[in-house]
Structures are given as structure tokens and as C-alpha cells.
Amino acid sequence: MDLLEYQGKSLFARIGVPVPDGRAATTAEEARDAARELGGTVVVKAQVQVGGRGKAGGIKLAETPDEAYERAEKILGMDIKGHTVHRVWIERASKIKAEYYASFTLDRSAKKHLGMISAKGGVEIEQVAATEPDAVVKVHIDPVMGLPNWLATEMVYRAKLDPGAARGAIALLKKLYQAFVEFDCDLVEVNPMILTEDGEVMALDAKVTLDENGFFRHKDFPAFAKEHVIPPVERMAKERGLNFIKLDGDVGIIGNGAGLVMSTLDVVSLVGGKAANFLDVGGGAGADTITNALEVLMEDASVKIVLINIFGGITRCDLVAQGVLEAFERLDLPWPIVVRLDGTNAEEGRKILGRVQSDKLVPAATMREAAEKAVQLAGGEVG
């Protein structure tokens, strides 16, 4: 579960990660009262589970309580990448001398925790990693041994942070790793981690993803979900038992198994397209599951084309094809569907697809061919 920034900061504060003082507000009046209580210049920050808030106008400085009121009034109700702002975080403004990046996550291939730090914070770290890979220091951490002081020190010095930030950054890294482990997180990320003009190192942002499998150890964590506003398409997918994540492209993806869906996303990107979603129908999906998945994607206006990529194991390709057939008969599908079937009963599945009387059905033999056809139909360039 992805937390809102202020929720992540509340967790950080529990174990001593330095964060700016702030208050949450759901109305402009509450924002003004919070600014008055904090005193001085504050930052009004939209609370949505998506990046790019600053570029979208969702983060504004306010020098007085009345300005905080005005800023909050404009930000509340904004739509940021499909997420409506229902809450703002009023935070005491910091005097920033330098911005850094720090995170901890799980590297499943290495079976270890992965710590990352960079002196280039406050920007998209993926872009930094792509253009200046040496600027992002990556360190594997044995989960049994934890993050010893010497390794945190090595991370900071290899990242070439300002000398005045070293001591505070080492301490913050150790606390951040403690948060990652103690709170059963999939990810903790701070971008930016800042050095203030007073020499303090603190977390100016907080991106925290909790592993819901660990909620039995944290009885208060499910309460975080009560403050999340789930977009209608995500709620519909959840009600139908589908694993769905909204993305910002236009190629709708349906696959069976998280690994296959992830691979499909990668191949779509490789050939010049952009996925609109991650949708995993799971193992053993039947005809109803496929029609349910297609109905969910019909609620997403950004989808221009749907790519169904099935590798039959437990899942039978003939049942998937039956679902596609039923969808064409029952639903007024607004876009073409590219279908690639392989594995169990694939031949039978292709025969069933042959009964579909529509030029909107586009068969494909391989994952790459399917991705290329989908991207072309979506109007993208195939590389």
C-alpha cells in the first residue's frame, strides 16, 4: 500500500527520522489555521499517491496564513494525473542548502536489501540513473546483518555529499533503514533529502510502500487506507479480484501472472509504446475473468488499444479465448484487441478466436509481434 506523504512522514517521525513540522488539512480554513500555528513561511503540498505534484502546481509556498488559505483553496480539488486532491499538507518551509536522494528497497534477484543514495536529489532519479549511472550509489545489504555504521558511512562518502552533510546523512540513512525493516516496507524513498542552511539533514519528502502481508504485526496500519481515495477504475478492478495498477500510457495490458505482465510492459516500452496499466488476471483465469478485465479497461478513457498476452499453464487459452469471444458479443468494445495466446490449449483458443466476426480482433504469434501491432494501432512509433 502506497502511503501519502504526510502518512510516510508520520512513520518516519516515530523512529526519529528528522522531518519538517507540519499539519494535514482538508479545507482551506484548516490550512490557514495550520499555517498560523506553524508560523512563518509554509509550503502547501497536495497529498496524492503520484509524483510530479510540483510540476502540476500542487506544491506552493505561502508566506502568511491568508496566502496558505488561497493556495489550499486552489490545490484542493485539483486533478493530478487522474488523482483528485482531497487533502493538503502544510509544512514549515525549510532553508535548503543542498538536495540529495536516498532509498531502501528489496532486490529480489540478489535476495538482499538495496540501498541507494545520490548527491543529485530533487529531480527524477530514474533520469539521473540513466544519464549519469555513477551518480547513484547502490549498495546491497544483508538483511540479517542490517546496515552497519561503516556501510552507511561508505554510502555517504561514495555519493560525494557535501562534507557538512556527512554526519547527519549517515544518521538519517540508519534511521531510514530502520523504518524500512521495522515497518515491513517494500520501499522507503526520500527525494529530496536535504541539507539545511543550519547544517541539519532531514527528509523533505517521504515515499513509503507498505507490504500488506506484514499488517498483522502493525494493527494500526490498515487505518492508513481509510484516508485513501481509490479512483473508480481501481475500485472496480479490486471488486472483481483483479490486480490492477494505473499507469500513464495508452496501451491497455492484460496478462496472466505478474512476471508476464511486467515483461509485456517492458516489450511495449521497447517497441516505442507506453502501457496504460498493469492488469494481472492471475493463474486459472476463465472466460468471466477476461470479460471482467475488459470491462475494467473500458472505464479508462486513456486506453486506445488493448493487448492480451497469455501464456497458458494453469490458465487455459481456450477459456481465455472464450472470454474474448463473449466480450465481443456482449460488450460494445471501443478499441481493437491484440491477442497473443501460447501454452495450454493455445491451438483451441486460436480456433475460438477465429469465430469472432470483427476487424477489431488482431491475433499475434509472439509477444513482440503483439506489442508492435498494439503500439502501431495506438498511434505510437514502433522501434
Image (cartoon, grey):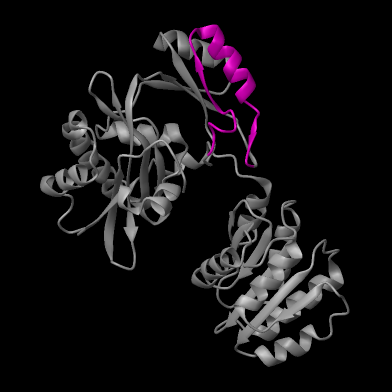
* Left or right side of 194 for 93: right
Q: Residue 142: horizontal and vertical position, in percent?
A: 19, 59
State the image quarter where residue 295 is shown: bottom right
**Is 334 within the magenta?**
no
Residue depicted at 62% across the width and 25% down the height: 76
**Is 64 within the magenta?**
yes
State the image quarter where residue 242 is shown: bottom right
The answer to whether residue 10 is above or below residue 354 is above
Residue 273 or residue 301, whichever sits in front: 273
Residue 93 or residue 328, whichever sits in front: 93
Q: Residue 226: horizontal and vertical position, in percent?
A: 52, 39
* Farthest-out residue, right: 357
The answer to whether residue 210 is above or below residue 335 is above
The answer to whether residue 195 is above or below residue 111 is above
Q: Residue 13: horizontal and vertical position, in percent?
A: 30, 31
Q: Residue 189: horizontal and vertical position, in percent?
A: 37, 43
The answer to whether residue 27 is above or below residue 191 is above
* Left or right side of 16 for 341: right
Query: Looking at the rendering, in which quadrant would you find the C terminus?
Result: bottom right
Point out the stretch of residues depicted in magenta.
Answer: 52-81
Residue 225 or residue 192, whichever sits in front: 192
Residue depicted at 45% across the width and 41% down the height: 3
Camera sees residue 289: no
Camera sees residue 14: yes
* Left or right side of 222 for 347: right
State the image quarter where residue 163 is shown: top left
Residue depicted at 55% across the width and 83% down the height: 314
